[in-house]
Amino acid sequence: MIQSAATVMERCEILGAISEESGILVRPYGSESMRRVNEIVAGWMRDAGMTVRSDAIGNLIGRYEARKEGGGTLVLGSHLDTVRDAGRYDGPLGVLVALACVECLNASGERLPFAVEVAAFADEEGLRFGTTFLGSSAFACTLEPGLLDLTDGDGVRVAEAVHAFGGDPDALARADRSPNDLIGYCEVHIEQGPVLERLGLPVGVVSAIQGQSRVGVGFVGEAGHAGTVPMEGRRDALPAAAEFVLAVEEAARRQEGMVATVGTIEAHPGAGNVIPGEATLSLDLRHGDDGVRGSALQALRERAKEIARARSLESSWRVRQESKAVPTSPDLTELLARAVEEIGLPAHRLPSGAGHDAAEVAAIAPVAMLFVRCERGISHNPAESVEEEDVAVAVETISRFLALLAGERG
Ligand code: HGY
Ligand code: MN
Ligand code: MN
């Protein structure tokens, strides 16, 4: 497992150097850098004895066949897209640990009673379209057709991007596979929080993934000359956006367990001496209880309207994507916990504040997740860091998990 962990670490470095921009890691859906990492990972999958396919959105899927047909399929994996100025482990670690486990099986010629697939999802972060989980929602066949009309910053529609990436937008509504064949999905991911580090544990077992909403919010007024238009009567869109940002922060601070973030804001037309006629921003709102999240979202929508009204502006509100809170499967999670305990570690259970592909795959299969300790809980940041020894524990845990599952189904 130590050798496998070293390979995982090296591969995280290799993939982490493949980016759309030099100096920072940024790998959005459908980009040239994503095409390159998919080619590299596909090569590693083939070397590990897997057959490789891409589905209708461009998720890369490697398959290691079962001892004999009809035993079902267990899917392991995570995503290969990144946020802007990303770390090297959020996503790729889960794909590469999964691959390392299949490599171990292949090296000893071992076949399990079920097939193992490694899924490398093509869009989890939603950087390009302000969404989340496009890849795994296509995999789970839960992708809302309306999403195909969303556009990126250059006006390219999701459907066009899927086509350009070699996918088939018309096939997204059709399942690539029968869910009846699926035994489950298990994802390894960095924790992205400080809990495991504080407890001194290399890995933890996820109990639930909290829900999230992503919204595009806009304020429209009238652009004008910064020097000649008096303050009285201006219809400046940016102060409205600023008021809204503060309202978001206040709403989240008031509600226990809620987190809300405005991660992007733009003023148009965007010149120092022009009153912004339009301001657009992103809202990311999360809570473990979907009802609480829904009410908070509605309240913020009303707030945006009030702010706009008071300033004689128009406001717009576009929910780009929502995902519900998802508990992990008790059975698979119990098995994962047993795998951790077999190594001689306590199986600490913790919820996930971050979203994960597992939340989408849960629509068609039971899911489980293993978190790996990361330094100071930092993620979505180039300072993301994991220890090779912890990765070795993750590889060993998933290998044992596969063996336990094989014992149950054998
Ligand atoms: O934003 C998230 O929770 C995930 O990292 N995409
Ligand atoms: Mn992420
Ligand atoms: Mn991730």
Image: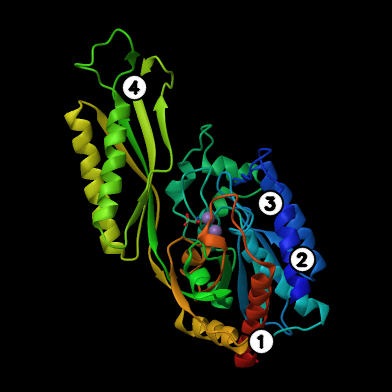
> Upstream in the sequence, badge 4 or badge 1?
4
Compared to residue 355, the image places residue 273 above or below, namely above
Circle 4 SS class? loop
Foreground pick, 57 / 322: 322
Circle 2 SS class? helix
- Where residue 135 appears, as percent x and y from the top left, is 55, 56
Label 3 crowding class (10 Å Cα cut-off): few <14, some 14-19, many 20+? many
Q: CA distance from mark 2 to mark 3?
A: 14 Å
> Upstream in the sequence, badge 2 or badge 4?
2
Q: Which residue is mark 2?
A: 7
Name the amino acid, label 3: Gly
Foreground pick, 219 / 348: 348
> Upstream in the sequence, badge 1 or badge 2?
2
- Where residue 115 appears, as percent x and y from the top left, is 68, 78
Q: Which residue is mark 3?
A: 16
Mark 3 in CB contact with mark 4 (< 8 angstroms) = no
- Where residue 157 appears, as percent x and y from the top left, is 52, 39
Q: Which residue is mark 4?
A: 277
Q: CA distance from mark 3 to mark 4?
A: 39 Å
Compared to residue 268, the image places residue 57 above or below, namely below
Foreground pick, 337 / 216: 337
Q: Which residue is mark 1?
A: 403
Q: Residue at x 72, y 62 (%)?
A: 9
Q: Is residue 205 something one can see in this rendering?
A: yes
Mark 1 in CB contact with mark 3 (< 8 angstroms) = no
Q: CA distance from mark 1 to mark 2?
A: 22 Å
Q: CA distance from mark 1 to mark 3?
A: 31 Å
Name the amino acid, label 2: Thr
- Where residue 323 appears, as percent x and y from the top left, is 40, 59
Q: Is residue 117 something one can see in this rendering?
A: no
